[in-house]
Amino acid sequence: MAGSAAAVFLSSAVALLCLHHLLILPAEPARAHRRAGRHHQHHHVSSSPSSSIDTTSSSVERRRHPGIPDMEAFREKLDRLPAGDWSGLEAELGPLDRYFGPGSPLDVRERLVYLFAILDHRSPNKEGGGVSAAVLEAWLRRQAAARLEAATRREMAKHDKNGDGLVALSEYKEPGKPWGWLHKFATADGDGDGALNAAEFNSFLHPADSSHEEMQLWLLKEKLRQLDSDGDGRLSLEEFIDRSHAFDHISSMEAHHQGDDHGLARARAENMFRELDADMDNYLTVEEARPVIQSLLTGEFSYATAHAKLLMKADSDRDGKLSLEEMLNDYISFYDIVYVDHHYDSDEVEVDADFHDEL
């Protein structure tokens, strides 16, 4: 029962995310790239006059740039990698900045040709070619992980005063929160040694993207605390409806599908609450409310999942995978995944927690 309710809620949330994003994404290509390079917004959609005339995949593949292997040589390099393996990408292809960095001479369409070759090589089913949502998501998660790791390295460099590769409790102080972060720090400190290594510090800084179960549970409890207006450690029906935004999501979906029926949306929210309330005590604990609260926690990895599904709108023949031509026909939508900035190690660029809220 709880699982089915969670599935309905999560599907609704993703649908809303995708619908809203579709309305704003094509308007300004550089806008999608804001987080990745606020001081590099001079990228042009096309750096080649011919690209505005002939944009077929064959014409794009024929273009030559100094220092960039042609597609035949590029595919030969990919073929030397184990099927479906990305672990040796940069060792075999060289730095990916060459193809996707801000200094690359390739325009958007040309970058897509090289990206398609990588994604197509990664696809488990080579028959007929094409890129699935799962492979797109894997690429986006790879980019997200690199951003998070770079942000963690920057922060560790600031706080690791003795250079031992650890951030001790005595070395860290969260601005504006002199004590509130201590439980979070202790939760991230998996081995209990009083200091955070790189992996633990990454979980501490980015709990929504942590695979550490204790860190996830801390975050869920923290979010429930924010929703729990009377401070009793659980959610009543009214708190669930008024503060978890479940009602807002359902109302939006009802308005889209059946007109603005406030009463019907509330009834569905109440039904969801009852299905989640496993012990039927009219309150939701953090574990009971977890499917809903989890959907409210947006991080880089959850964005990757939603973004991959969104990009599949380019699948014009609805066969469940993207051909190169389909990606080129909708190239603006892919702008921000083919500009992989190399400057995440710079203090000028930070992972923007509010960036995805614009979607």
Image (spheres, grey):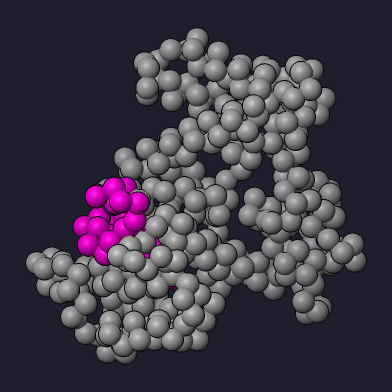
Name above or below for residue 137 compared with residue 359: below
Let me know if residue 178 appears in the view.
no
Say which quarter of the image contains residue 122.
Answer: bottom left
| Part of the protein shown in magenta | 313-341
Where is residue 78? Give x, y as percent: 40, 81
Residue situated furthest left in the rendering: 53
Residue situated furthest right in the rendering: 193
The reply to whether the magenta stretch includes residue 340 is: yes
| Front residue of this view, candidates 206 and 323 | 323
Name above or below for residue 268 compared with residue 186: above
- Left or right side of 289 for 319: left
Let me know if residue 192 appears in the view.
yes
Where is residue 306? Give x, y as percent: 47, 47
Where is residue 62? Give x, y as percent: 18, 80
| Front residue of this view, candidates 9 and 27 | 9
| Point 27% across, 89% down: residue | 66
| Point 16% across, 67% down: residue | 56
Name above or below for residue 133 compared with residue 282: below
- Left or right side of 180 for 194: right
- Left or right side of 281 for 93: left
Say which quarter of the image contains residue 153.
Answer: bottom right
Residue situated furthest front in the rendering: 127
| Point 24% across, 49% down: residue | 316
Name above or below for residue 343 compared with residue 31: below
The reply to whether the magenta stretch includes residue 290 is: no
Q: In which quarter of the image is the C terminus?
A: top left
Q: In which quarter of the image is the N terminus?
A: top right
Where is residue 207? Give x, y as percent: 68, 52
| Point 77% across, 45% down: residue | 218
Q: Tally the numbered discs.
A: 0
